[in-house]
Image (cartoon, rainbow, N blue to C red):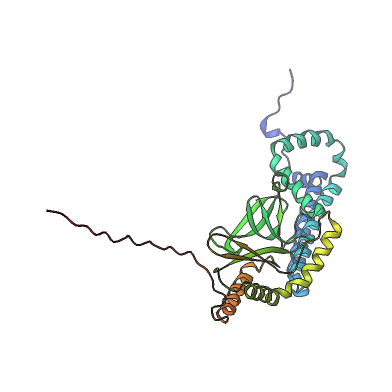
C-alpha cells in the first residue's frame, strides 16, 4: 500500500517565492518594459505638441508639425512593439496573415478609408485649408485623419458659400467612390457671372462701358494672381488658354437687354464681390440721368372696352 500524506503534511507554496518567480518571468518583464516605453513615448508626444504654440506662430505649419509628431509617435510605438517581441514574430507570421485576411474582409470600409488617407497625401487630392466637395458635402478642410476628413460645412440653408456652423466628418473612402471637387487646388479662383437687365431704348454703348469699367476697377486685384496661376495650370495640364480679364456680353430677349459680366474671383470672396459689383453698378447707372435704366418684369392689364347697352321696351 502507498504511503498516505495528510493535508497537514502537504507542501505549502511561499507567496514571496511565487511573486519572485512571476517577476522573473521573461514575458512579464517584456510587458512591463513595453507599457513603460509606451507611456514615456505618449508623454513625449504630448509635451512636444503642447510646445508648438510657443515656437511656431503660423497655424498651417503648426498643424502639419503636430500631425507629423503624431505619426512619428505611432511609428515609434510599433517599432517598440517589434523590438520587445522580436523573438516571437517569426512563429506568428502565419497566424497574423490568416487573422489579417479575416480582419481586412470584415473591416473593408476601414481599410478603404486608410487607403484613401494614403491617396490624399500621395496623390494630393486636397490639403487642409482647401475648399472641397466631398461625399456631397461642400466645406473647408480643417483636419485630415486616418479614417475621416473633417469639413467646416458651407451652404445648405446658408447662401453665398458661407459657413453654416456644422462640422462634418466624411470617410476617406469617398475619394475612390465619388468625384472630389477642389475649389482651391491648382487654380484657387472661380469664374462667376452676374446679369444686369437694361430697358430697350437705353444707351447700349454707355451701359457696356460702365459695366466694363466697374468690373475692371473692382476686380483688378485678382487679375495678376489669377493669370499667373492659370499659366501654371496650362503648362501642367492639357487645357486650352482662357480669358482671365472681365468680359461683358449682351443678348436681347422679349423683355429687355441682358448684359452678362463674367469675371474671375477668389473662391472665398464670391458673395462679397457680387455685393460690391451690384452696389457700384447701381450707383453708376443713377448718374446717367436716365440714359441707362434697369429693366424689370412688368404686367400691363388691358382695359375692357366700353359697352353701350340699350334695352328696347
* Residue occupying the point 85% across, 57% down: 236
Residue 26 x, y percent position in the rendering:
83, 45
In this view, 119 is above or below 163: above
Q: Going by the image, does 192 lie left or right of 29?
A: left
In this view, 13 is above or below 119: above
Q: Going by the image, does 29 lie left or right of 248?
A: right
Work out which residue is located at the far left of the displayed protein and give it: 313
Work out which residue is located at the far top of the displayed protein and give it: 1
Work out which residue is located at the far front of the displayed protein and give it: 312
Q: Going by the image, does 63 lie left or right of 193?
A: right
Residue 196's quadrant in the figure? Answer: bottom right
Residue 279's quadrant in the figure? Answer: bottom right
Report whether residue 48 is seen: yes
Residue 34 x, y percent position in the rendering:
79, 51
In this view, 67 is above or below 174: below
Residue 157 x, y percent position in the rendering:
53, 59
Residue 202 vs residue 87, the one in the foreground: 202
Residue 216 x, y percent position in the rendering:
70, 75
Amino acid at each position: 500500500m502507498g504511503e498516505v500524506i495528510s493535508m497537514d503534511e502537504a507542501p505549502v507554496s511561499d507567496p514571496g517565492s511565487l511573486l519572485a518567480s512571476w517577476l522573473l518571468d521573461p514575458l512579464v518583464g517584456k510587458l512591463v518594459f513595453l507599457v513603460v516605453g509606451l507611456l514615456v513615448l505618449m508623454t513625449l508626444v504630448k509635451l512636444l505638441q503642447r510646445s508648438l504654440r510657443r515656437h511656431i506662430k503660423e497655424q498651417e505649419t503648426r498643424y502639419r508639425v503636430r500631425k507629423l509628431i503624431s505619426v512619428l509617435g505611432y511609428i515609434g510605438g510599433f517599432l517598440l512593439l517589434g523590438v520587445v517581441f522580436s523573438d516571437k514574430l517569426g512563429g506568428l507570421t502565419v497566424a497574423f496573415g490568416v487573422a489579417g485576411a479575416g480582419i481586412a474582409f470584415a473591416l473593408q470600409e476601414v481599410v478603404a478609408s486608410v487607403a484613401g488617407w494614403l491617396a490624399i497625401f500621395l496623390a494630393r487630392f486636397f490639403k487642409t485649408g482647401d475648399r472641397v466637395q466631398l461625399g456631397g458635402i461642400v466645406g473647408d478642410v480643417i483636419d485630415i485623419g486616418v479614417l475621416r476628413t473633417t469639413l467646416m460645412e458651407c451652404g445648405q440653408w446658408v447662401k453665398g458659400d458661407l459657413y453654416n456652423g456644422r462640422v462634418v466628418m466624411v470617410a476617406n473612402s469617398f475619394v475612390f467612390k465619388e468625384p472630389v471637387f477642389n475649389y482651391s487646388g491648382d487654380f484657387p479662383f472661380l469664374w462667376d457671372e452676374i446679369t444686369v437687365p437694361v430697358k430697350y431704348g437705353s444707351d447700349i454703348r454707355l451701359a457696356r462701358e460702365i459695366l466694363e469699367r466697374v468690373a475692371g476697377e473692382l476686380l483688378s486685384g485678382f487679375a495678376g494672381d489669377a493669370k499667373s496661376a492659370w499659366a501654371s495650370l496650362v503648362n501642367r495640364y492639357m487645357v486650352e488658354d482662357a480669358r482671365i480679364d472681365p468680359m461683358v456680353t449682351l443678348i436681347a430677349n422679349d423683355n429687355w437687354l441682358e448684359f452678362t459680366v463674367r469675371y474671375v474671383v477668389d473662391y472665398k470672396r464670391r458673395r462679397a464681390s457680387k455685393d460690391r459689383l451690384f452696389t457700384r453698378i447701381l450707383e453708376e447707372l443713377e448718374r446717367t440721368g436716365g440714359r441707362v435704366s434697369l429693366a424689370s418684369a412688368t404686367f400691363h392689364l388691358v382695359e375692357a372696352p366700353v359697352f353701350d347697352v340699350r334695352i328696347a321696351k
